[in-house]
Image (spheres, rainbow, N blue to C red):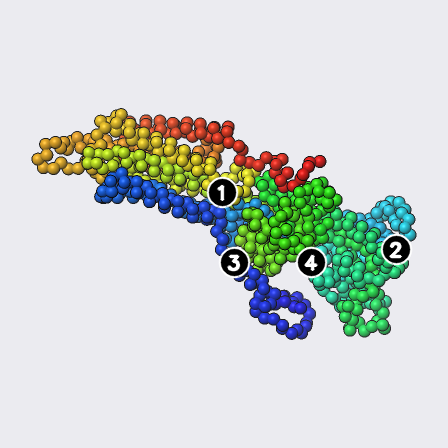
Amino acid sequence: MVFSSTTITKGRGKGIAVNTGMKTEIGKIAKTLASTSVVTRTPLQKKMDILAYALFGLAIILAIIVFSVNKWVVNDEVAIYAISVGIAIIPEGLVAVITLTMALGVRQMAKNYAIVRKLNALEALGSVTNICSDKTGTLTQSKMIATDAWLPGDGLYRISGRNGFSPEGKIYRCGINVTSEIEVEVEDEEVTPDNMRYAFTRLVQASALCNMAVIKKGKGNDEWHAIGDPTESALQVFAHKAGLPKSVLTAEPFKFELVQEYAFDTELKRMSVVCKEKSTDAYYVFLKGATESVLNQCTKIQFGENETNLDREKFGPELYNELEKLASKGMRVLSLAYRRVIKSDIEISKLTREKADADMIFLGLVGIYDPPRPESKAAIQRCFGAGIEVHMLTGDHPTTASAIAKEIGILPLLWSPELENEGKFNSQLVMTAAQFDALSDTEVDNLSELPKVIARCSPDTKVKMIDALHRRNKYVAMTGDGVNDSPSLKKADVGIAMGLGGSDVAKQASDIVLSDDNFATIVNAIAEGRRIFSNIQKFILHLLSGNAGEIVTLIIGLSFIDSDGISVNPMSPLQILFLNMVTSSPPAMGLGVERASGDIMRYPPRSKGGLFTWEVIIDMIYYGIVLGGLSLANFVIVIYAIGNGNLGQNCNSSPYGQECAPNDPTCDPIALEIACHQIYRARGTTFATFTYILLIHAYNCRSLRDPIWTMKLYDNKILFWSVFGGLLTAIPTFYIPELNSKVFKQLGIGYEWGLIVGAVIIFEIFVEIYKFMKRRYLKPLEIVEGEGLKRQYSLNEYP
């Protein structure tokens, strides 16, 4: 079968179309993508929805309170006061600040090799509880290197050299030789083309000729590069080290020529080629692939210099024991075979794959190691410390996958199948896809813990894993690179595609594309998401505590009734808008670009606590009460302690109050003007108190618990200049004629500056006492390392 959207790289063929459109394999994937394309809102979006409805409901309730206090006699003054209260409860700059913070986060992520395709994915990363990652190229370097070979009768060969595609290195035959079931100890022997044994020569020929990869040195530098499959490239490097690369084998004296290629088949799990050796006119078939597949095609075995019939019962246990030894070191193990074809026996041009691959002679095993990225282990440890579980979903052999998982820390070093079978762990940590897929949803949900490693993984297994995690209320990030990974990328909360080796379909289905295909970049992206989430929490605390303070001021201000029975506004509507838009929004933007704290990856995922934790809610209420109380206290001091306590008439709209009626002997216009001037100065004092406390309060919001003196003043330049600019911007509103009295409904202040400074100092004292109590009596936010490891490794007991 050839599937729609397959790219044909070489050759010719005829076929019969049996399905079209949505009935093709690519159509099935498209149908799956369509079924998983339900738009889900991120935790932040959900919290913002709740906040919007809550604030809207609260605004209505407060307006009802204003009307009720005025006995539902609604005139212009009462309506304006109700509108003022409604304005005070809404953080007008919130949406703009969130959008700006997200946009700056996207720019920062692009610098760190993560391209954010969907803006909300950046915030969603901060809520991730589980990462499901591929192995090859993400956790490992995808720079395969052949490190070991094993031949029946010859024993183990060690292949030296550095990682990558450099052919520099030597091959040694290890110090135990097995001949006729007798072990003889010998010294390690360097292998060269001159002393190479017959069986090993055939193994090298099979590695070089049954291979379409090419390695070559780059122009202008000494770097070696590979063109082709990484596994085949590793075999080609192995042949170079042995001194018999394809370039040598195709030249004198061998002069091998490719006659026929049977490409690697994912179902058969093998590849073969037919070559002609021109020097002898002999034809050879070379075969490589998975051990089970290769062994099924063999009838003989190359035992030293001799060919013997393959006795599976006798040879099988030894072979699979050696295979397990190599796989347990994290190697991908390939088997190789060959046979000579007599041209007179069969016409080469009519040689089918079934006939070519039959009656092969087994040569041996080659162990290929894909070294983990140096940063993978540290990145996984950061995940453990942050309460994030890491799962490896790979197509490799279970032994290979578990060995790499142990090396980089996904599995504990003490893990082994034997200990797992003895019940030393809470659950089965390593499964094959066949085992996992065989479980029903109920059986999966009954597992105490989902497996850390799933080997021989298929795209459908990834989708099943995501569904299982979602049923446990987990927030999942999934990596993928192939077309078949698209459904799982779409279904995950955060789909992460590979930029270097990923398909265009996978990138389209993803939320984030990694330009370096590196697992550590995912962890850095999560840290960036947490920073953004933390900063959003900081500036929401700043904005809403200011709104809470305004509500306290205005609602209590209803009790100030003038001689006409009208409430006197402690702050005018424009003052409130100025506070919300000009005073508080720039510092909120400064908080939005706050650097991540050093312990950002020691907190549990935010999805467990949400944006509005009880601590944050209580902080808002406390800071709002203190802020509103101090501002209102200064309003009272100016009117009652320093002034004469006269609230005048109609002082909400004019500094001169209501005009006296003609021939009204009880009305004193001078007294009314003095009273209204007094109100205007008190309103100016309240506004200034609120402004300067709110600006200084931005520094308090940089940390929920740390005192203000532990934070550097100038390390966040945007915050510093927004606060400094806010301090200066408010001053003209007091002293510019007409602007102060007719627009802001206030007058210039003098001695009141002393009250303002005193209020700021008292506010800071209240804040630091409150934070001290939290540090002393509330449990730490971060995860304790031992508990994190115990949960991550699921140990019943420690060794």
Q: Which mark is residue 37?
A: 3
SS for callout 4 = loop
- Find residue 775 and report its horizontal and vertical position in percent: 50, 30
Relative to the observer, which residue lies in front, 57 or 648? Answer: 57
Q: In the picture provided, is 379 more to the left or to the right than 317?
A: left
Task: Tell me the amino acid under the disc marked 1.
Answer: Gly
- Find residue 252 and report its horizontal and vertical position in percent: 82, 63
Q: Which mark is residue 610?
A: 1
Q: CA distance from mark 2 to mark 4?
A: 30 Å
Q: Which mark is residue 229?
A: 4
Residue 591 position (above or below residue 777) = below
Label 2 packing within 10 angstroms: few (<14), some (14-19), many (20+): many
Task: Tell me the amino acid under the disc marked 4.
Answer: Asp
Nearer-N-terminus badge (1/3) = 3
Nearer-N-terminus badge (2/4) = 4
Q: Would you say the residues marked 2 and 4 are in contact, meaning their CB atoms lie under 8 Å apart?
A: no
Q: How many marks?
A: 4
Q: Which mark is residue 304?
A: 2
